[in-house]
């Protein structure tokens, strides 16, 4: 049985989370060379009796689907994680179970993530959507873009809204779910539900008995019954990281956890890499918007978490979307995956370039000369990298709606240079002034991925932000504060 990719999904509820916020996060561990894209789909109405084509099969479409933003492997239809305009977030985990997953093509767990987001206006509604489709169509098929072998897994889900979360774990068409309303919770690449089950497939326990996995006399423990013998109760790095946080959990706390390679939450191994990450902030007050921070690039310790807010007339951003190959895509033709096209989008390519520049000898020698000024070589590097800063670290999908908030109610983004060395950090508060009835404004947040804590590199940050925020011709007050 192939090892499931070691992804990690987390959620924290008040009072463990600060300021009445629900904080959700996921690291998506996938094959190292796989590209993830970030895509927005608007709400839409659909014709009666129409179908929606998922990764491998088609299912009945519903009359209306919600607006969603998702991070997904570029070759498939579904999503690793995402959110909808009703404040519902879903992420899934590939898991192994005592019963091997089907190789027959059906719905992937990632298809069910997207279907749940498109059709559920609350976490519970999304749960009901997923289990109904699971029971009707089943789950199965290759989780990877690999012609040489079929990698199939069972699925677990963390489904979250402003008020509650549901942990849903599945084995074939059978499932169990637990409701969570307080504290912290994490799911990893193994079954975690035990005896607290708040909803389940009506034939779950009789099926376990028929397989000889449960006698019916002992208390029913889902993970003990359905986990492989050598997999049950394995330590979850994300759970440990959340539980040992002494202070209230914030957006920055969740980002720091996802960036932590030493704990095993951020994966960089021979087989797997954290290819994309997300952190979502869901205020329990419905008067405040949800904010979803996506990387759109691999390795969160070297990526920017770029914010997105649902508003009317969201502008799509092609820089974070992979090329579309239509019906000629090798993932759609049978036999599948006979070729592997270049699915890198512009953001991904620029991220690769930035990491290459960071690794180069020229940059590693530093930006500043011995005199403290900018050396000729450093200036040349700076000129080469400046256009990169204006493209590689951007996911320009964040929109602020009008009317504008009053003074003191700007949107606050914690911005930190992404190096493993100790680097200066900045708090950036963006407060729009005037134009209170203006249409939504794109905010292009840029920051260097190769900024070192000295000389010209650090000085680039305010300049880059000023250039980017000035592109809309509006007045913004920018506060930069070393922290």
Image: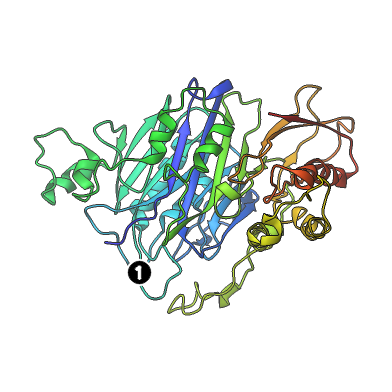
Q: Nearer the viewer, residue 14 or 313?
A: 14
Quadrant where the C terminus sits is top right
The image's colouring method is rainbow
Q: Residue at x 27, y 30 (%)?
A: 196
Side of 171 where 386 appears, left or right: right
In percent of width and height, residue 396 lies at 73, 49
Q: Is residue 107 visible?
A: yes
Q: Which residue is label 1 attached to? A: 150
In percent of width and height, residue 172 lies at 29, 54
Q: Nearer the viewer, residue 335 or 189?
A: 189
Image quadrant assignment for residue 379:
bottom right
Q: Is residue 439 above or below residue 342?
A: above
Q: Is residue 141 above or below residue 464?
A: below
Q: Nearer the viewer, residue 92 or 479?
A: 479
Side of 331 where 151 appears, left or right: left
Quadrant where the N terminus sits is bottom left
């Amino acid at each position: 049985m192939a090892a499931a990719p070691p992804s990690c999904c987390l959620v924290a509820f008040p009072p463990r989370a600060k300021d009445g916020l629900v904080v959700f996060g996921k690291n998506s561990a996938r094959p190292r060379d796989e590209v993830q894209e970030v895509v927005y789909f608007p709400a839409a109405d659909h014709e009666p009796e129409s179908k929606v084509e998922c990764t491998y099969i088609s299912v009945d479409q519903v009359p209306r689907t919600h607006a969603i933003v998702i991070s997904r492997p570029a070759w498939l239809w579904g999503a690793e994680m995402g959110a909808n305009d009703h404040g519902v977030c879903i992420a899934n985990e590939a898991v192994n179970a005592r019963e091997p997953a089907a190789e027959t093509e059906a719905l992937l767990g990632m298809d069910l993530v997207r279907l749940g987001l498109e059709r559920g206006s609350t976490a519970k509604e999304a749960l009901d959507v997923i289990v109904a489709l699971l029971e009707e169509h089943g789950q199965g098929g290759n989780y990877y873009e690999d012609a040489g072998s079929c990698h199939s897994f069972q699925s677990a889900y963390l489904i979250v809204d402003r008020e509650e979360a549901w942990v849903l774990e599945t084995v074939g068409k059978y499932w169990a779910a637990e409701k969570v309303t307080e504290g912290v919770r994490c799911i990893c690449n193994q079954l975690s539900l035990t005896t607290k089950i708040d909803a389940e497939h009506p034939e779950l326990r009789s099926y376990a008995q028929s397989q000889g996995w449960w006698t019916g006399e002992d208390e029913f423990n889902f993970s003990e019954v359905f986990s492989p013998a050598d997999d049950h109760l394995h330590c979850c790095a994300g759970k440990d990281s959340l539980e040992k946080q002494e202070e209230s959990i914030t957006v920055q706390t969740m980002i720091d956890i996802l960036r932590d390679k030493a704990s095993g939450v951020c994966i960089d191994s021979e087989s797997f890499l954290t290819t994309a990450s997300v952190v979502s902030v869901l205020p329990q007050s419905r008067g405040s918007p949800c904010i979803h921070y996506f990387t759109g690039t691999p390795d969160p310790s070297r990526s920017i978490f770029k914010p997105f807010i649902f508003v009317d007339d969201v502008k799509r951003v092609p820089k974070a979307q992979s090329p579309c190959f239509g019906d000629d895509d090798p993932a759609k033709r049978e036999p599948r995956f006979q070729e592997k096209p270049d699915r890198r989008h512009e953001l991904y390519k620029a991220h690769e370039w930035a990491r290459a520049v960071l690794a180069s000898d020229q940059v590693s020698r530093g930006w500043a000369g011995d005199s403290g000024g900018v050396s000729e070589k450093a200036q040349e590097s700076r000129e080469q990298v400046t256009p990169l800063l204006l493209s590689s670290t951007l996911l320009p999908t964040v929109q602020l709606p009008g009317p504008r908030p009053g003074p003191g109610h700007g949107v606050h983004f914690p911005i930190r240079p992404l190096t493993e060395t100790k680097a200066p950090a900045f708090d950036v508060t963006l407060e729009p002034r005037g134009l209170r009835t203006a249409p939504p404004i794109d905010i292009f947040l840029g920051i260097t991925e190769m900024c070192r804590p000295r000389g010209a590199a650090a000085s680039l940050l305010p300049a880059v932000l000023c250039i980017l925020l000035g592109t809309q011709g509006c007045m913004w007050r920018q506060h930069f504060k070393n922290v």
